[in-house]
Image: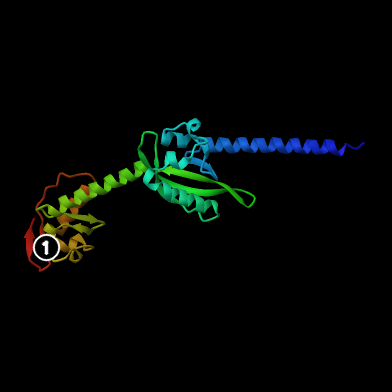
């Protein structure tokens, strides 16, 4: 009792179609739920994929974007020709290295995105580009704010008339100009990496260590305290 070859062929075709449909649905679910922006473009630069993360970052609904030319909507005017040239190069089989660039939101705001790009292929033919993006805007703003804060702090320390130093694991790692003057040093390298004990007068090293131990344990009651230090020329100074 054999089955007709045409019946077997039809069954295999339907099985393959079901498997393909399930795979497609799974891929679409992954794209939709991904935390990263995922944007797909065809060879004409028209948007074919625009996931939920891309909607959140840009403010556009996918229904507004799909089928539209991406560069005119999502790329700031001053970068459009550069991005179109990069896109054409990628379609020609060129490298698609990761990069950082801004994207234009619906409100007109520019947001900084880190992109990873890949080519969509059918056999050997590149049919489009798939881009994965992470929004760096808040992180970059925070980094810039931190840098500005550090620079402001450094200026305050540098221009302070009081000697300020930072000690890590018992050694100086930062000194301001007033500290150089106090110890009669001409360059920070003369003090940086020195054990703080070396700069405290021998008669007061034990008490200085005790105060530091208490401070590290959270007890600041021993401060402010007067300490006798040794300058680089060997003379003593009370601080």
* Dot 1 crowding, Cα within 10 Å, few <14, some 14–19, many 20+: many
Q: Is residue 230 visible?
A: no
Picture layout, residue 79 above or below residue 2: below
Counting from the top left corner in percent of width and height, residue 104 is at 39, 39
Which residue is most to the bottom?
A: 233
Quadrant hosting residue 25: top right
Counting from the top left corner in percent of width and height, residue 88 is at 51, 51
Q: How is the image coloured?
A: rainbow
Q: Is residue 150 left or right of residue 180?
A: right
Picture layout, residue 178 above or below residue 84: below
Which residue is most to the right?
A: 1
SS at circle 1 = helix
**Foreground pick, 202 / 92:** 92
Q: Is residue 4 left or right of residue 167?
A: right
Q: Quadrant of the N terminus?
A: top right
Residue beneath the point at 19% across and 60% down: 196
Residue beneath the point at 13% across and 61% down: 180
**Foreground pick, 191 / 103:** 103
**Foreground pick, 150 / 113:** 113
Q: Quadrant of the C terminus?
A: bottom left
Picture layout, residue 100 above or below residue 104: below
Counting from the top left corner in percent of width and height, residue 53 is at 46, 36
Q: What residue would you read off at disc 1? A: 183
Picture layout, residue 26 above or below residue 208: above
**Foreground pick, 200 / 45:** 45
Q: Is residue 100 left or right of residue 222?
A: right
Counting from the top left corner in percent of width and height, residue 75 is at 41, 43
Q: Is residue 34 left or right of residue 125?
A: left
Residue beneath the point at 77% across and 38% down: 12
Q: Is residue 19 visible?
A: yes
């Amino acid at each position: 009792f054999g089955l007709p070859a045409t019946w077997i062929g039809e069954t295999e075709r339907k099985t393959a179609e079901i498997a393909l449909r399930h795979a497609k649905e799974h891929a679409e679910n992954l794209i939709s739920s991904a935390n990263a922006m995922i944007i797909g473009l065809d060879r004409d630069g028209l948007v074919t994929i625009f996931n939920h993360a891309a909607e959140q970052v840009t403010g556009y609904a996918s229904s507004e974007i799909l089928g539209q030319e991406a560069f005119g909507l999502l790329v700031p005017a001053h970068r459009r020709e550069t991005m179109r040239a990069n896109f054409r190069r990628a379609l020609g089989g060129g490298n698609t290295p990761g990069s950082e660039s801004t994207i234009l939101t619906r409100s007109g705001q520019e947001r900084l995105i880190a992109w990873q790009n890949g080519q969509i292929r059918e056999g050997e033919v590149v049919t489009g580009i798939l881009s994965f993006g992470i929004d760096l805007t808040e992180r970059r703003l925070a980094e810039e704010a931190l840098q500005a804060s550090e620079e402001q702090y450094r200026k305050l320390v540098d221009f302070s008339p009081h000697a300020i130093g930072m000690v890590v694991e018992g050694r100086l790692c930062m000194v301001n100009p007033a500290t150089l003057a106090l110890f009669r040093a001409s360059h920070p390298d003369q003090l940086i990496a020195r054990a703080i004990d070396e700069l405290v007068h021998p008669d007061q090293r034990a008490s200085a260590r005790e105060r530091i131990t208490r401070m590290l344990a959270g007890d600041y009651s021993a401060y402010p305290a007067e300490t006798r230090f040794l300058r680089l020329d060997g003379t003593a100074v009370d601080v």
